[in-house]
Image: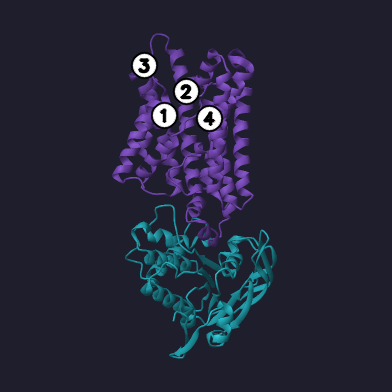
Chain colours: A purple, B cyan
Amino acid sequence: MVGLIVAVLTASALYLLPGLGPRWEYALALRATRLAGMVLVGAAIAVATVLFQTVSRNRILTPQIMGFDALFVLAQTALVASLGPVGLAGLPIAAKFAAEVGLLIGAALLLFGTLLGRGAQDVPRMILTGVILGVLFRSISTFLARLMDPNAFATVQSQAMASFSRVNASLLPYAAGLAGLAIALAFVLARRLDVLALGRVAAVSLGLRHDALIAAALALVAVLVAVATALVGPMAFLGLIVVALARWLAGTDRHARMLVVAGLIGPLVLIAGQTVFERALGRQSTLPAVVEFVGGLLFLGLLLKGRIR
Amino acid sequence: MIKVQALSHRIGRAEILADIDLALPEGKITALIGPNGAGKSTLLSLIARLMPVQAGQISVKGLDVAQTPTRDLAQVMAVLPQSPSVSSRLRVAELVGFGRWPYHQGRPSAEDHAQVAKALEVFALTALGPRFLDELSGGQRQRAHLAMAFAQATDWLLLDEPLAALDMAHARALMQQLSALRNGGRSTLMVLHDINFAAAWADHIVAMKAGRIVAEGPPAEVLTPAVLEALYDTPLRVEWFEGRPLVLYHL
């Protein structure tokens, strides 16, 4: 764990310091904003994925499978379609961020709510509903995109891709507050989540308020994913890669430890990916492409070697 | 004592349980028997608070399962899952350790550790303690779950068809362990499909059909051709072997 903290700090330094150039104050402030965004998003996505995998009792799922990304892209597409690229750029940033977070949390709670009405016993059904809604959102986005002029479409495409150059310094405190609160609550629930992983019958038998805990965990997932997505855009496979690596490194499924390890690996993967993206590739790609290519290879390697089960 | 009063349960329009009244004695192994769809598992799930009670009342040792905080109920009854599946990678000793959760909520004391060590010893799991659950056979895993329930130190133990996935040797071993627990003063309520296991090991038998209780009592009274033929709608013979009924339904 100490090693991980050192690795995160080293990566941060490697990202922040080299080649600042003559106007170093400006460059440093810009990089610091992005760095803060990466730490926040990495930790949020990692914790959300750990929680979601526990609730769904499945280790190859991420909350994004439920169509969060698709809904975000749809919202962007609809905004561009109705306001035009200029109109989108003219929107007040704070209000747009608040509306996006609200929309994503609302949608998640609606979806999770249908589950909880059934006594929290039908998680697979909820996931399938989310997947189907995701397809629906994506189809509507594609349809709207077809009606647009090429300029507007280019704007949509850039919005639909996660990017840390989009991180706005004025939004960071709010995003950090929300995500920090949700992550703290996840740590409070850590021991109970260990019991939850025993399965519903065993958890109820041990006196855990099973259904209430599932509701709480899903609410935290909703907040974390919404904040991360609204801040930088969709990061579909980041959580899967990060949590798989964390399980391998943590060597236990105890949540208190898993949450810390995953919460450190998330930022580490993002910072390393962004450094490679900015320095080695000269921005000739996208960050998700970098993270998912390298992370995906590592994930497959571990899977084939049987280090991840 | 487990007391069930005027219990009814519906799923959609289907009536699963109809006006059940039942008083289950302590210090005994009670077997719920009956054909498929009789409502045995539903009754067990309702007693175990795995499903909310719709109509009627259930109390375990005087605690109403619908009103009592679930944590308090966890100190009077333990429920064993039908096919235990744990999604996290746990060692046997860790799993058994969870049996003390109702008492320490995640911060085990020396007393809790001692109880866990005792449970591992009673179920001959001490050597397997450091092994991961997914490295065990089905029978060993069931034993680990039973040890967890033992560590929970509850008066009542509820099991839904625990023999379903076990071979002969493990099935008999499980019944022997339950009978040892009974001799130590614990009470067991279990759904049993194999009627001869009920005949050989149970002290009290509750026969259910179509959501109602059709017979109740010691094996010698309930396991008669008249009761069983009506219960299962099939002709069968009942012989006696070493002072207990032996049901010949497969001939």
Residue type marked 3: Gly
Q: Quadrant of the N terminus of chain A?
A: top left
Under circle 3, the secondary element is loop
Q: Quadrant of residue A13?
A: top left
Residue denoted by label 1:
A270
Same chain for marks 1 and 2? Answer: yes
**Foreground residue among A277 and A146:** A146
Please give the chain letter of the residue carrying mark 3: A
Question: Could you say where residue B44 lies in the image, as x and y percent from the top left?
Answer: 57, 68
Residue type marked 1: Leu
Residue type marked 4: Thr
Looking at the image, is B227 positioned above or below residue B209?
below
Residue depicted at 44% across the width and 56% down the height: B86
- Identify the mark nearer the N-term, 3 or 4: 4
- Identify the mark nearer the N-term, 1 or 4: 4
User: What is the spatial separation of the Cα atoms under label 3 and label 4, in whole angstroms?
Assistant: 24 Å
Residue denoted by label 4:
A229
Looking at the image, is B112 positioned above or below residue A96?
below
Neighbour tally class for label 2: few under 14, some 14-19, many 20 plus, Cα within 10 Å:
many
Residue denoted by label 3:
A282
**Foreground residue among A236 and B65:** A236
Indicate which disc residue A163 carries: 2
Please give the chain letter of the residue carrying mark 4: A
Neighbour tally class for label 3: few under 14, some 14-19, many 20 plus, Cα within 10 Å:
few
**Foreground residue among A111 and A182:** A111
Same chain for marks 2 and 4? Answer: yes
User: What is the spatial separation of the Cα atoms under label 2 and label 4, in whole angstroms?
Assistant: 10 Å
Q: Is residue A266 left or right of residue A114?
A: left
Neighbour tally class for label 4: few under 14, some 14-19, many 20 plus, Cα within 10 Å:
many
Q: Indicate which label's residue lies in the foreground, 1 or 4.
A: 4
